[in-house]
Amino acid sequence: MERASERLLTPGEVASLFRVDPKTVTRWAASGRISSIRTPGGHRRFRESEVRALLLGEPSESAR
């Protein structure tokens, strides 16, 4: 179940953490490497907890 207080990151914020281009983050989401949420305006957002887990090398929730 999704926590309402979960911080959501933009593709640019995720890209900064991984030191990649934001388009790379978008490709990761399209391929299922990381899950994303769509805003009402159609923009992607990423759960901070999942991004932090990926940074630590842990499998994402969607990969389990």
Image: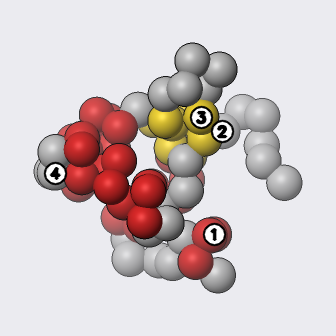
Where residue 52 appears, as percent x and y from the top left, is: 44, 57
Residues tagged 2 and 3 counted as in contact (Cβ below 8 A): no
Which numbered tag is attached to residue 35? none
- The residue indicated by pointer 3 is 38
Which one is closest to the eye, mark 2 or mark 3? Answer: 3
Q: Earlier in the sequence, mark 4 or mark 2?
A: 2
Labels 3 and 1: the sequence-earlier one: 3
Residue 52 is at least partly visible in this image: no
Q: Describe residue 11's horizontal placement relative to residue 52 as left or right.
A: left
Viewer-side label of 3, 4: 3
Badge 3 amino acid: Arg
Amino acid carrying label 2: it is Glu
Q: Which picture quadrant has residue 41?
A: top right
Q: Residue furthest right?
A: 1
Q: Nearer the viewer, residue 5 or 46?
A: 46
Residue at disc 2, secondary structure? loop
Compared with residue 48, is residue 61 higher up or lower down, i.e. above or below?
below
In the depicted view, which residue is nearer to us: 63 or 32?
Answer: 32
